Amino acid sequence: MKVNTNRPDIGNAVLTFAEVKRQLEWPGGRGSTQAFYEQGTGWFMGMDLNSTSKSKNSRFLRKLFKSPGRGQVWFGYEGEEGHGQTRLAFYAYCDNAKTQHEVAKKLREKLRGKLKGSPIKAEERDGNYYNATVKTHSNSLRSDVDWFCTVFAALGLNLVS
């Protein structure tokens, strides 16, 4: 397998993560981690936003999600080996099914009519986490940064321009 080094996609993805993090005013260091991993035939490239007392947005999410661990959110790109399409994806790490369904409901209400083709789901339990997700193959907004920031804003987070 070879990566096409003539395409700027990987670099653009890294810049997208950095810009979303900047707009959220999320601290670096232990507050966030760029992550790439595989699970079965799936792959994930994105950013974990961890609980940190240095961020108002993190404190807000801690109350909203009640995440059982340090991780509060993962956002980025995911795909399946052998499939050409990549999805933009957002995972909210919730502590139980009730919180998960409340977060998914809030996202559905706030994102209605804003993100076309972006279903919001309460996923099956994954270890200690009950994930509420938003995913899409096609972004109807100006940029991927706009898509991710629209999801964060729908949760009630404050973003800077």
Image (spheres, helix red, strand yellow):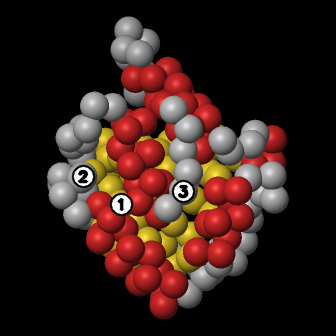
Q: Which residue is mark 1?
A: 134
Residue at 28% of width from left, 31% of height from top? 142
Circle 1 residues within 10 Å: few <14, some 14–19, many ≥20: many
Q: CA distance from mark 2 to mark 1?
A: 10 Å
Q: Earlier in the sequence, mark 1 or mark 3?
A: 1
Residue at 81% of width from left, 41% of height from top? 29
* Residue in front for this viewpoint, 64 or 96: 64
Q: Is residue 17 visible?
A: no
Question: Badges 2 and 1: C-beta atoms under 8 Å apart?
Answer: yes
Q: CA distance from mark 2 to mark 3?
A: 17 Å
In the shown orientation, is residue 140 left or right of residue 101?
A: left
Residue 68 drawn at (x, y percent):
69, 77
Q: Which residue is mark 3?
A: 157
Name the quadrant containing residue 106.
Answer: bottom left
Q: Is residue 40 above or below residue 46?
A: below
Closest to the camera, between mark 1 and mark 3, is: 3
Question: Badges 2 and 3: C-beta atoms under 8 Å apart?
Answer: no
Q: Which residue is mark 2?
A: 115
Q: CA distance from mark 1 to mark 3?
A: 16 Å
Type of residue at label 3?
A: Leu
